[in-house]
Amino acid sequence: MKRVLVVDDNLINLKLACDILESENFEVIRATSADEAIAILEEAIPDLVLLDIGMPGMDGYMLTRKLKSLEKTRDLKIVALTASAMKGDDVKAYEAGFDGYLTKPIDTRNFASSVSKFINSEKSNKRYKK
């Protein structure tokens, strides 16, 4: 069973993403802040982190940079799960260290398969190249 950490400060978005993944037999861990995510990652490393970019305090960009700088979490696959869908937002996410980019609102029909593709992708730490 694949384990996914979903980090989102919006409880409705968090519940929707987790419910979809759980219905497709993923093991899901929930966090509502960067600090909570860090505490969880000290205990266990999931197969993938789905991370909201726009959170209060430490946002998704800052958390991703931090996680990619630490030896324990350097190779962790982190995918942005965000409502930021303006031109260039995906480039900014990849430059911050995200390994993938999914936009909200979630496409409930394809969400679980998209998550599976990220988990099964070759290697983490794919950086955006101009």
Image (cartoon, grey):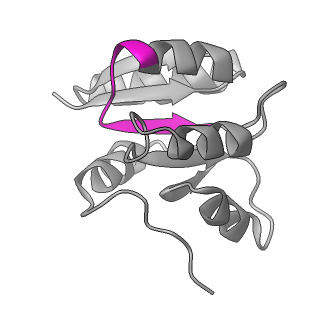
Report the front residue among 47 and 25. Answer: 47
Q: Is residue 44 magenta?
A: yes
Image quadrant where one finds the N terminus: top left
- Residue at 35 percent across and 42 percent down: it is 112
Occupied quadrant, residue 22: top left
Q: Is residue 118 above or below residue 71?
A: below
Q: Residue furthest left?
A: 1
- Residue at 33 percent across and 18 percent down: it is 44
Percent x, y of residue 40: 46, 14
- Residue at 37 percent across and 39 percent down: it is 48
Q: Is residue 28 magenta?
A: no
Report the front residue among 17 and 126. Answer: 126
Percent x, y of residue 19: 42, 21
- Residue at 45 percent across and 36 percent down: it is 49
Report the front residue among 50 and 74. Answer: 74
Q: Residue furthest bottom?
A: 130
Q: Looking at the image, can residue 105 be seen? A: no
Residue 60 placement, left or right of 81: right
Percent x, y of residue 57: 83, 24
Query: Start and end of the magenta stretch?
Result: 42-51
Image quadrant where one finds the C terminus: bottom right
Residue 73 placement, left or right of 97: left
Occupied quadrant, residue 88: bottom right
